[in-house]
Amino acid sequence: MRQIVEFASEPLAKHGEELCGDTVKVTSTPDSFLVVLSDGLGSGVKANILSTLTAQIAASMFEEGATVEEVMSTLIETLPECQVRRLAYATFAMLRVYRGHKAYLVEYDSPPLILIRDGQIVRLPAEERVVNGRKVREAHFVLQDGDYMVLVSDGYEHAGVGGLYRLGWGWDNIAVSVKRWASTGCDACELTRTLAKTCLKLYNNKPGDDATAVGMRVREAVMATVLTGPPADKAQDEVAVRKLMEAEGIKVICGGTTAQIAARVLGKELKVQWMPPSKRIREPDRKKGTPPLAKLEGVDLVTEGILTLSQAIELLESSPTVHDLPRGQDAAIQLARILLSADAIHLIVGTAINPNQVADLIRGEPMRHVYIRELVREIERRQKDITVEYI
């Protein structure tokens, strides 16, 4: 199984400011994960612009293989020092992970990366050196399954100054908190949101500085394959079903006719789970009932097609993460939960036009394909790996 870095970020703007002066830039591919957290000098619009420029420049250059000397030189030329305070206009931390294992860390005037492994805080053997007149820390290390990592801006270290913590929350206390929450087995989103809530509480809900956390967890990638719609050529029915059943990870069928084809090819019984209308989920913003589920041996989820796809897309549009989905176990919620939980998704889409679908006949294109495009857009927006195969 492929190892990946699951991530989430949570910005807190300084009290009274609309924009956070910190910026997080993430690029994620099947082979590489790169995150940059930049903290702009001061707060508000100016800090936001400066941190955005820093994060974008650093991320794009490191991604293209630039050295830390080249990155620092470009940043110095683009963002000169504040002549009054003799401070850099923006600081940053960059972490790049290759294939979920080999990690390279660069930190410039930012709090050190927090790494939790096997329930313990790991002190990374970072090398400090001067690059273009600036002190930079670098570290090369190897990640293991189950590792947790957190990057924070210095607004986290200052949280609680003069209150619960006389000198602020501080790196050591933050690391202990991350260690405690990591012991619960939480995911990156839960970890990051918990950190943000604690930070906000320490500031009495009025942050005295921009504060951002990037939470990460190393784990095996979750794969999902979705078969939806019959092939245009019935001779390809067996091929489509075989592709689904031979795929790694979670297996989903969306479509009544598609499910019947799979049952026939597999020689298995398709069992529809009928539910009384009174027991079907009726969310305030989803007045339509959701079609029932079905059971087919060897397949993790079997749903109706068009309506379930459209409702799942609505859920994706309103739910940034799996934790934001409404409670319930109807077909659309279960499909959305799988799509948000998976890291790599492969869609096998049948190209047959349904003669009973007027819209298909008028447009000359199945409505299913319209929904597939919308689904791909939502998945790509979350920087997940998604591929589509038409058959």
Image: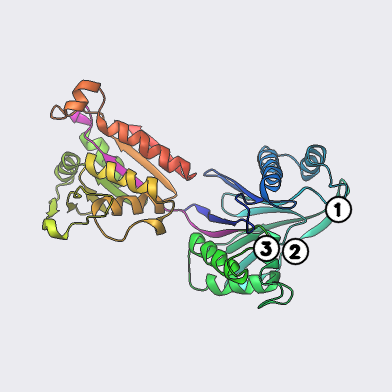
Magenta span contains residue 222: yes
On screen, residue 124 versus residue 241, left or right, reads right
Image spot of residue 366 (x, y percent): 25, 28
Q: Are marks 3 and 1 in contact (CB under 8 Å)?
A: no
- Label number found at residue 125: 2
Q: For this rendering, which residue is in front, 248 or 153?
A: 153
Q: Which one is closest to the eye, mark 1 or mark 2? A: 1
Q: Camera-side residue: 269 or 127?
A: 127
Q: Relative to residue 268, is residue 380 drawn left or right?
A: right
Q: Quadrant of the C terminus?
A: top left
Residue 346 lies, in percent from the top left, at 37, 41
Q: Secondary structure at mark 2?
A: loop
Q: CA distance from mark 1 to mark 2?
A: 31 Å
* Location of residue 85 with respect to 74 vertically, above or below: below
Looking at the rendered structure, the kind of residue marked 2 is Pro
Callout 2 environment at 10 Å: few (<14), some (14 to 19), or many (20+)?
few
**Residue 238: image x %, image y %?**
22, 37
For disc 3, the marked residue is 208
Disc 1 residue type (three-letter): Arg
Residue 350 in view of the camera: no
Check disc 1 and report the residue beneath it: 85
Task: Indicate whether 244 appears above or below 15.
Answer: above
Figure quadrant of residue 215: bottom right
- At x 16%, y 26%, the residue is 358
Tell me, yes or no, whether the highlighted magenta stretch contains residue 241: no
Q: Residues within 10 Å of mark 1 (few under 14, many from 20)?
A: few
Mark closer to the chain start, 1 or 2? 1
Mark 1: which secondary structure? loop
Residue 176 at what x, y percent from top left?
Answer: 63, 74
Looking at the rendering, the stretch of residues picked out in magenta corresponds to: 213-236
Q: CA distance from mark 3 to mark 1?
A: 19 Å
User: N-terminal of the two: label 3 or label 2?
Assistant: 2
